Amino acid sequence: MPTHHFGRATRRIGLVGAAALTATLAMAGTASAHAEVEADTPQALAENVTLTFVSEAESSSAGFTELRIVLPDGIAPADVSLDEAPKGWTFKATADGYTVGGAALKTGVDAEHKIKVRQLPDAKEIAFKTVETYSDGEVSRWIELPSGGEEPEQPAPLLELKAAAPGAKPVGTSPTPSATPSATPSAASTAATEPAGTATTSNTATEEDDGMSSGVVVGAIVVALLVLGGGAWWLVKRRAATRSN
């Protein structure tokens, strides 16, 4: 092979190799940006456990403003409280988890917060689906779960738990708003608890109304008869006057 052909082939191989290396590094960089969760007591049915969440910054132009966490089965929003968060960030419970957020963090700064959980569920592994929002409106969703032995591209933070301690039992779920008795009685309960005297009074009022209605009708008939009688008398008198004339 001529020397110049060999040089061209060598350069092409070098370019292809460089491109492959660049793509590999880019993929590694993307994969390294993810969300994680750790526990100070990673054990099933453990109580008063502190969970630490870390969302790695992946934007080169914006910072985190909010994290939304979906709690796994066995942990209710009422069983969670904020333990630590970036300065100025606030915690708010949602129907299926909670949000924590506030002023935008600096670009490239990871978002870390901690929560206190009343009790972990009796499971081997629990997932905390996480949605991250940046100050420029970009949203990253770490919500995918392993399926069929394949590693998801954007996996939800997973927490592996050791077996529950001997004798450990569920402490029960916290009361929910729906379990709180309503301050306004329903129509059915009001009717069921209505005093007997109320019904009697209603019947009496109905009878009085009926009596008044009957009196009004009779009075109207009498007035009508008087008007008809007066008209008949006037006609008779007029005819008599006409004949006399």
Image (tube, rainbow, N blue to C red):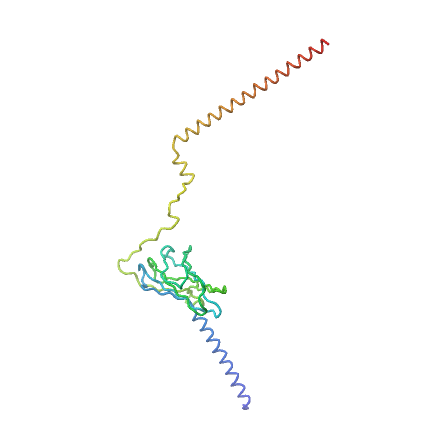
Query: How far from the left and from the top, in percent, is residue 111?
Result: 41, 66
Q: Would residue 113 be visible to someone looking at this image? A: yes
Query: How far from the left and from the top, in percent, is residue 69?
Result: 41, 60
| Residue 200 vs residue 44, the one in the foreground | 200
Relative vertical location of residue 67 with respect to residue 25 in this rendering, above or below: above
Question: Which residue sits furthest front?
Answer: 88
Placement of the C terminus among the 4 image quadrants: top right
Question: Which residue sits furthest right?
Answer: 245
In-image side of 37 versus 19 (left or right): left
Q: In which quarter of the view is residue 185 placed?
A: top left
Relative vertical location of residue 117 with respect to residue 233 in this rendering, above or below: below
Query: How far from the left and from the top, in percent, is residue 160?
Result: 35, 64
Residue shown at 45% from the left, 73% from the top: 29
Residue shown at 70% from the left, 11% from the top: 241
Q: Would residue 150 be visible to someone looking at this image? A: no
Placement of the N terminus among the 4 image quadrants: bottom right
